[in-house]
């Protein structure tokens, strides 16, 4: 297996010169778990750690390696371990606001060709949550594909209604399948191309890990059934890249309870394309689409061309993204000011 089989294409080849380090070679991050890494170069997969210089130069968590990243590393101890020195620029990425009160980016995965947004047809189906995943994909320039699982638990008519609900909010392909009956699985498997990287996104219990195990052909990852209330449990505890026998690469991710938006304005505009296009026709260029006269968006809502709940979701995500981005930028400024202060103190202490 070569680097090309792992997704190293002409885009990354164009960045080789800037990321070459004497005595080092290139590899891909195959797993990240609580600050520890594993890298894969097509021949071997070994544990890896960050070099001291790299750790010192990184000033934000989003610059740390994440699963799917291409890195420059040197091997040691008879090629049984490695040290990471550089991270290649990311062609695409998936990120979100860090969970909880922390206002910072959390990288999910990098260099993804398509994101499979998985929703269960039984308990988990939620178009508002789906919109958030679509924004995440659009923000990182990743092609979204919606996968509806557990179709064996609902009727054909109900499935058709759910597919219609998805197509109303997503300009994306939709694949409906059941890991129990096997319906739709062949179509899904055929959509996976060798050398391409796919990431699974979704809440706990929607069937991501079961689906990956079926693609692999063995129970490589542990699964647990959901409760009677439909509450999923976090089966996957780390982000991990797997190479299938047919050559496609899959990344499984832990279920996400929070999908906070931060600095995702462009992603929101791309995901709510109908609203963005209407905005260009508003009388005022800074129209908030709420009370201004001559608002094309409000007019479309009034005549039924844009659903009210879709519009409300757009406003909510815009407001949330802008608020967190402003808070993040303020935090970054304080961190930089503090860093300059520390350097100044050290400089005067040396004197």
Image (spheres, rainbow, N blue to C red):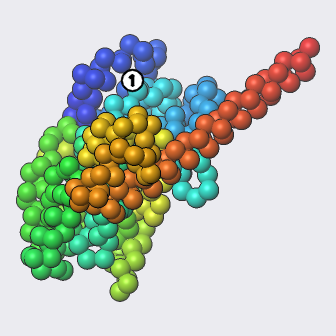
Q: In the picture shown, does residue 297 fall above or below 206?
A: above
Residue drawn at point x = 36 percent, y = 18 percent? 15
Q: In the picture shown, does residue 203 fall above or below 12?
A: below
Q: Quadrant of the N terminus?
A: top left
Query: On the picture, is 62 further left or further right than 161?
Result: right
Residue reaching furthest bottom?
Answer: 228
Q: What is the secondary structure assignment of the residue under circle 1?
A: strand
Say which of 63 and 308 sits in front. Answer: 308
Residue drawn at point x = 38 percent, y = 84 percent? 229
Residue 219 in sight: no
Query: On the picture, is 210 further left or further right than 106?
Result: left
Question: What residue is pinned by disc 1?
Answer: 25
The x, y position of residue 178, in whole percent, is 16, 70
Residue reaching furthest front?
Answer: 293
The x, y position of residue 214, in whole percent, is 19, 63
The x, y position of residue 259, in whole percent, is 45, 56
């Amino acid at each position: 297996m070569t680097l090309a089989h792992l997704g190293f294409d002409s885009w990354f080849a164009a960045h080789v010169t800037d990321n070459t380090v004497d005595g080092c070679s290139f590899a891909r991050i195959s797993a990240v778990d609580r600050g520890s890494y594993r890298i894969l170069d097509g021949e071997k997969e070994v544990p890896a750690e960050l070099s001291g210089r790299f750790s010192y130069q990184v000033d934000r968590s989003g610059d740390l390696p994440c699963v799917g990243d291409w890195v420059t590393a040197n091997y040691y101890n008879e090629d049984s371990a490695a040290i990471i020195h550089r991270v290649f620029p990311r062609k695409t990425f998936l990120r979100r606001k860090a969970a909880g009160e922390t206002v910072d980016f959390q990288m999910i995965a990098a260099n993804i060709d398509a994101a499979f947004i998985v929703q269960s047809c039984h308990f988990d189906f939620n178009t508002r949550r789906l919109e958030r995943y679509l924004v995440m994909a659009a923000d990182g320039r990743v092609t979204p594909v919606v996968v509806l699982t557990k179709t064996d638990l609902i009727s054909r008519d109900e499935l058709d209604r759910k597919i219609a609900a998805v197509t109303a909010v997503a300009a994306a392909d939709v694949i409906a399948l059941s890991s129990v009956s096997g319906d739709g699985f062949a179509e899904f498997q055929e959509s996976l191309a060798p050398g391409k990287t796919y990431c699974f996104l979704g809440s706990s219990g929607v069937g991501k890990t079961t689906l990956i195990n079926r693609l692999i052909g063995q129970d490589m990852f542990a699964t647990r059934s959901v409760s009677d209330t439909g509450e999923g449990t976090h089966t996957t505890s780390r982000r991990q890249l797997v190479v299938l026998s047919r050559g496609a690469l899959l990344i499984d991710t832990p279920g996400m309870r929070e999908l906070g938006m931060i600095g995702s304005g462009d992603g929101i505009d791309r995901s709510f394309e109908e609203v963005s296009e209407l905005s260009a026709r508003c009388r005022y260029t800074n129209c908030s689409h709420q009370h201004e006269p001559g608002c094309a968006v409000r007019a479309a809502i009034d005549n039924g061309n844009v659903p009210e709940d879709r519009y409300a979701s757009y406003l909510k995500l815009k407001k949330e993204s802008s608020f967190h981005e402003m808070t993040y930028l303020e935090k970054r400024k304080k961190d930089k000011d503090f860093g300059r202060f520390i350097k100044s103190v050290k400089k005067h202490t040396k004197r």
